[in-house]
């Protein structure tokens, strides 16, 4: 086919993605090949594609495409997470628009609406991933509330409960007043805020004029106070031991208690103890047997126990209480105060500590083996810097609150009996059998199932096992073939939320790790360093980006600036660079397509062919190593330089036939043409994981000969590493320097590229320049290359490697200007040498630097000394 003048990404993307799907290239079933498995971090069913998804899924697609081309049975399992809190909020909002209040409908009715919402919006993000080129096995798409997935979650809950790892109890938990549900410690984000510190007077009982002053940031909770606590060693308050005080505004009498927990130098040294609304106060209350007075409703408003401001929101009540205290003479003063508060990761509501009956999972016993997998290197975290973070979390883990006060999710399989006891069973019928062991007279109507659902992370923690039905059917062919999976690509912020819990469940259920490597991506930030978000308006629409630059251009742009574990400063110019790279490849292909084989011509490009073959293999070594070390950004950059610099800028220029006026195509010998096409074909293979659409489009051109329908780049075998002539590669690097310097001379002297110039070389190395004369003449437009034994007076000189080159120009040299140039270069080289020598004479540097670093510094010194000698020789020549 005749290739179009410009590349049309949209047309190629639609054509080839459909083609790949039609021919089942993404499909995987167990066979005799080595499996390579990735499970997608399931995006929330509420989600739409954002830049973080783009980065994460581009990395996964690069890995899965590369594995496929290595002949492995590549399986990438896609799916979505039901996201209990976020989805329920969306459904409640939808119902509100329809004039329906959640309180007015049954659970069954609500779930019908929830499924309606999920069916309409839940697949958006997966469809968007297809535009990116994600080569998932879409026939395996899972949803964490599919029947089989939910059954697996229930089975796992029952298993852990039987082992005593799940229990029910009253504990202080994190309450989200907006979501009206408990959230785990890991779902609470600490945020520093500016607040007020209120100094409140508590008057002593029996002494109307005497009072204590208490500093607090939460005056709205004083009605829940159970005591005032002072340090027993604080001499300021010795007279208060055994006394009582009145709570301002409501005049309830509470005791003064003694405990060394109170810090004497914070605030006034007196602490108000509110057991129902503070975790530490709760522990203090338990120790001193204080009453628990909960004055807040689930939505964060004050209830009847508050006695005043009933029905007011907690923050509105704070302002009003401050006014009431001031009017009553109970507010001594206020101060500005900076402190941290907890906010819900899902709703951004300020978390309220709340005493509540909840379901918990014991973590310490499960955490130890999960920590060992990482510390022993069975599960590698990439980069390794996250191992210490992981260790800290796992060694300080607390029991996990797994129950949520929602309707959307897996309903906890616990059934309450009339006497307050409960049984745990998979179905109500099974629960009745359990209940009748306690009392044979129980009927099914006596059982009431727990209203709460399980935390979403409880189900997604099973993801690598449940997607292969390994919980319900632990010995099936698929789980035995695909598990453990290979690589997991995810974000550091869910290292404990999700990664640790998958390792725990993998060990618990199968005695195995769930994956071998965890590649932790960074946060996508704008060029000012701000995290991208809708609120800031600094996050581009990925779909619009792909429309503008093509999916391949955006993929390249994302990967060019994304080292593992480090945040990436995204700039749209990276995508433009990616698009330009695609155009460069397209234009190189057009150039080759414009050549015609002339069998009468002999090959004059053997050096160029041998060089590029070695350089290609050398690049493959680096790319392979980068992939082994999960340096994907570096692997792409190595590929980018191989294509743009080595192939396009040098190789094609070396072998390009001379322009023949009037010819439809430029003639080239058969051997060079075959080598050039073969190199391009291998380049397409190396490029494919990064740029799947462009490479597939070019792969099917007639240039590569007739192809079978299924002979596609997506399943082409990656090239293997061949022999590398390191001497040839090193010598061509010198030749490239020579040609670059000749071009610099032309630019500096404003000479036409068409004007042939004489070149002389004083050889100090072992390079045989006659071998490369053809390349130098062709690319440098040199009329002759001669060898001299002494510096050539009156010629423009430069150094390449250790050899000295002279260009004798047919123009008069400005001796003073040339002398000034050489003196300036001499000054620079002397300064450079001084810096290098200082480093080499530094004992600390020499003792601690790696051998290759020292070797590099010594090479710099030798090169600089050689260049300085040539400069000084030329200065003497001008002086003579």
Image (cartoon, helix red, strand yellow):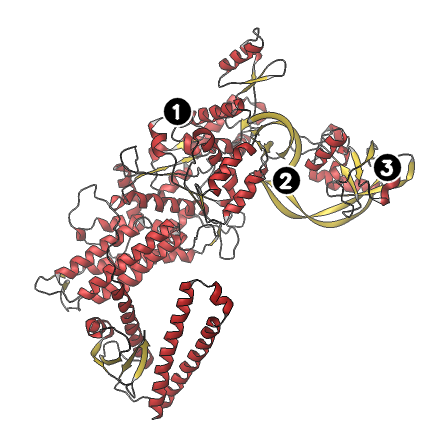
> Can you give x and y, in whole percent of width and height, for residue 576 in the image?
38, 57
Left or right side of 746 for 773: left
Is disc 2 placed on a helix, strand or loop? loop
Left or right side of 685 for 90: right
Q: Relative to 595, is 381 above or below?
A: above
User: Which residue corresponds to mark 3?
Assistant: 241
Is disc 1 placed on a helix, strand or loop? loop
Q: Locate the C terminus by quadrant.
A: bottom left
Looking at the rendered image, the disc whose residue lies closer to the viewer, 3 or 2, is 3
- Are circles 3 and 2 on residues that touch, CB within 8 Å? no
Q: Pick whichever of labels 1 and 2 is earlier in the sequence.
A: 2
- Spatial CA distance of label 3 from label 1 is 65 Å
Report the disc number at residue 350: 2
Quadrant in which residue 851 is drawn: bottom left
> Can you give x and y, in whole percent of width and height, for residue 205 in the image?
89, 34
Q: Pick whichever of labels 3 and 1 is earlier in the sequence.
A: 3
In this view, the residue in front, 397 or 548, is 397
| Residue that protrudes farthest toward the top in the picture | 441
User: Which residue corresponds to mark 1?
Assistant: 473
Residue 790 visible to an observer of this rendering: yes
């Amino acid at each position: 086919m005749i290739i179009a003048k410009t590349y049309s990404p949209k047309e190629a993307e639609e054509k080839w993605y459909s083609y790949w799907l039609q021919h089942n290239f993404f499909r995987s079933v167990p066979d005799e090949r080595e499996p390579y498995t990735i499970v997608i971090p399931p995006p929330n069913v509420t989600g739409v594609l954002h830049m973080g998804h783009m980065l994460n899924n581009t990395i996964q697609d690069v890995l899965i495409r590369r594995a496929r081309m290595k002949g492995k049975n590549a399986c990438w399992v896609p799916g979505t997470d039901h996201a209990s809190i976020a989805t329920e909020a969306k459904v409640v909002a939808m119902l509100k628009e329809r004039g329906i209040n959640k309180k007015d409908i049954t659970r069954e009715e609500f779930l019908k609406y929830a499924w309606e919402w999920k069916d309409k919006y839940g697949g958006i993000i997966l469809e968007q991933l297809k535009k990116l080129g994600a080569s998932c096995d879409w026939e395996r798409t899972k949803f964490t509330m599919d029947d089989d997935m939910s059954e697996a979650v229930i089975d796992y809950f029952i298993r852990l409960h039987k082992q005593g790892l799940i229990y029910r109890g009253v504990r202080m938990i994190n309450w989200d007043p907006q979501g009206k549900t408990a959230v785990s410690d890991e779902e609470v984000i600490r945020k520093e805020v500016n607040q007020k510190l209120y100094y409140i007077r508590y008057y002593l009982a029996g002494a109307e004029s005497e009072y204590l002053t208490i500093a607090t940031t939460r005056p709205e909770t004083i009605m829940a106070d159970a005591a005032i606590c002072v340090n027993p060693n604080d001499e300021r308050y010795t007279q208060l031991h055994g006394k009582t005080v009145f709570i301002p505004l409501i005049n309830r009498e509470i005791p003064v208690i003694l405990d060394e927990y109170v810090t004497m130098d914070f605030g006034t040294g007196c602490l108000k103890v509110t057991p129902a609304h503070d975790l530490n106060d709760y522990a203090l209350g338990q120790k001193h047997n204080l009453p628990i007075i909960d004055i807040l409703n689930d939505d964060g408003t004050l209830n009847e126990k508050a006695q005043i401001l009933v029905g007011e929101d907690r923050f509105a009540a704070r302002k009003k209480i401050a006014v009431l205290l001031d009017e009553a003479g109970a507010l001594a003063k206020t101060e500005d105060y900076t402190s941290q508060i907890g906010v819900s990761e899902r709703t951004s509501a300020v978390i309220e500590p709340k005493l509540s009956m909840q379901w918990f999972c014991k973590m310490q016993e499960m955490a130890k083996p999960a920590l060992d997998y990482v510390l022993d290197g069975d599960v590698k975290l990439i980069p390794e810097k996250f191992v210490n973070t992981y260790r800290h979390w796992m060694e300080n883990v607390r029991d996990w609150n797994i129950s949520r006060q929602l309707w959307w999710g897996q309903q906890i399989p616990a059934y309450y009996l009339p006497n307050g006891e409960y049984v745990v069973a998979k179905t109500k019928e099974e629960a009745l059998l359990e209940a009748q062991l306690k009392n044979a007279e129980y009927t099914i109507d006596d059982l009431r199932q727990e209203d709460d659902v399980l935390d979403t992370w409880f189900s997604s923690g099973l993801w690598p096992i449940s997607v292969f039905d390994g919980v319900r059917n632990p010995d099936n062919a698929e789980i035995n073939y695909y598990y453990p999976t290979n690589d997991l690509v995810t974000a550091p912020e869910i290292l404990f939320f999700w990664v640790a819990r998958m390792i725990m469940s993998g060990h618990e259920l199968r005695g195995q790790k769930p994956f071998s490597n965890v590649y932790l991506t960074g946060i996508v930030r704008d060029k000012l360093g701000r995290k991208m978000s809708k609120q800031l308006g600094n996050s581009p629409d990925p779909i619009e980006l792909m429309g503008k630059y093509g999916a391949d251009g955006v993929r390249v742009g994302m990967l060019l600036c994304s080292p593992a574990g480090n945040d990436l400063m995204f700039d749209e110019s990276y995508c433009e660079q990616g698009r330009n790279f695609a155009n460069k490849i397209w234009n190189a292909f057009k150039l080759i397509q414009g050549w015609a084989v002339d069998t009468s011509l002999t090959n004059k490009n053997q050096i160029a062919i041998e060089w590029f073959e070695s350089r290609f293999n050398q690049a493959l070594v680096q790319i392979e190593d980068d992939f082994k070390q999960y340096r994907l950004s570096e692997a792409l950059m190595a590929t980018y330089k191989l294509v743009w610099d080595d192939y396009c800028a040098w190789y094609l220029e070396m072998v390009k036939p001379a322009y023949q006026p009037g010819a439809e195509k430029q003639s080239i010998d058969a051997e060079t043409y075959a080598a050039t096409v073969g190199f391009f074909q291998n380049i397409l293979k190396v490029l494919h994981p990064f740029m799947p659409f462009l490479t597939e489009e070019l792969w099917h051109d007639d240039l590569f000969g007739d192809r079978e329908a299924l002979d596609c780049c997506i399943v082409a075998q990656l090239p293997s590493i061949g022999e590398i002539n390191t001497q040839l590669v090193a010598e061509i690097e010198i030749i490239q320097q020579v040609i670059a310097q000749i071009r610099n001379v032309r630019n500096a002297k404003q000479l036409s590229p068409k004007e042939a110039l004489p070149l002389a070389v004083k050889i100090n190395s072992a390079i045989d320049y006659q071998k490369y004369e053809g390349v130098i003449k062709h690319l440098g437009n040199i009329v002759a290359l001669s060898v001299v034994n002494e510096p050539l007076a009156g010629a423009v000189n430069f150094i390449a490697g250790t050899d000295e080159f002279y260009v004798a120009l047919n123009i008069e040299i400005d001796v003073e200007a040339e002398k000034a140039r050489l003196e300036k270069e001499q000054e620079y080289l002397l300064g450079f040498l001084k810096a290098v020598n200082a480093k080499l004479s530094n004992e600390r540097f020499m003792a601690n630097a790696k051998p290759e670093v020292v070797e590099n510094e010594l090479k710099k010194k030798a090169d600089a000394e050689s260049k300085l000698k040539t400069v000084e020789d030329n200065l003497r020549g001008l002086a003579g």
